[in-house]
Image: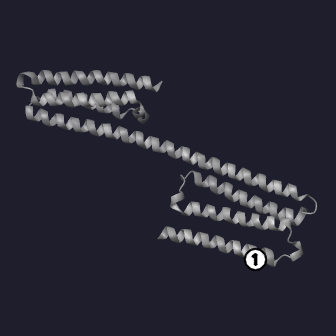
Amino acid sequence: MRTSKIIFSTYFSLILTIFVTIFLFFYLSKEDSRNVIFYFNLFYACFLEIIFFGYLLIIRYKQYRFLSAIYPVIGTITIFYIIVSLIIIIAYNILVINVIPHKYYYSTVIVLTTIYFIIFAFAGKLDIFHKKSLDKISNDKESLVSYLTKLQDIEQSYTQICYQKKLNQAQVSNCSSTIQKLVNKIKFSYPSIFKESDFIKEIDSIIDEVRNKISYLEIANEDMIVKTNEDLISFINNKIKLISFYQTKLRK
């Protein structure tokens, strides 16, 4: 509802402003002076009003949200363009209209408007690029969090199984610290590495194998518990080295 009010008030103000502008142009001019340049000035004034209210709509209407860093850029170039355009309109039509040919006036306005739209388009492109970069970082972080969650679940599962199997504290502590090393090794990876398919396959493989080995530990008899636990520790340590190798390789 609030959005609809914003849109309505902006469009209503724009239409009212354009109506007043047209009225003043015709009211303050003589009929015989309404030539080509008169209508050009009228059209250009209305165009500047559309630009101004369009900018207001952008900063007020959430659907057209830019990143906060882009607003000062858009605002600066828009206000600068409008002010310079008004100065050109007033200066030409009051001071030098009989000195400088109209074609130079038209050319100046067209060039200035073209430059404005080029800069505006560049700012919009920069905004899109920056948003994509932020989305990519966000997605990479989500991937990292997903793997850390899986590893934390594995660690909890291991602790429960060790409690059930009544492993001594030294064995449990040794394996838990090893799993934590694996967690930290992945945790402190740079997020973009999770876009590398080879690295992802390796991490998935490691997690699946660790789960399998913990499952073996759960069903192991008393004679095999210690060996199975040691195999798990050895496997994780080897994979930590492999992850370090991938991290070094993919940084290059």
**Rendered location of residue 18, percent (x, y):** 70, 71
In the image, residue 178 sits, relative to residue 47, either above or below, namely: above
What x and y, as percent, mark residue 178?
A: 24, 27
Q: How many marks?
A: 1
The part of the image, by quadrant, that contains residue 191 is top left
Looking at the image, residue 230 sits to the left or right of residue 246; the answer is left
Residue at the far right: name it: 99
Q: Is residue 250 visible?
A: yes
In the image, taking residue 7 as reference, residue 51 lies left or right, namely: right
Say which residue appears at 18% left-offset and 27% top-offset. 213
Residue 8 sits above or below residue 114 on the image: below
Instruction: Name the residue tied to disc 1.
Output: 23
Q: Secondary structure at mark 1?
A: helix
In the image, residue 134 above or below residue 208 = below
Query: Could you say which is closer to the camera, residue 155 or residue 48?
Result: 48
Measured as percent of width and height from the top left, residue 124 is found at 60, 50
Q: Residue at x 21, y 35 (%)?
A: 155
Q: Position of residue 94 (x, y in %)?
A: 87, 66
> Which image quadrant is residue 56 in?
bottom right
Q: Residues within 10 Å of mark 1 (few under 14, many from 20)?
A: few
Seen at 14% across and 37% down, the residue is: 160
Residue in the picture at 38% in, 21% down: 245
- Picture quadrant where residue 139 is located: top left
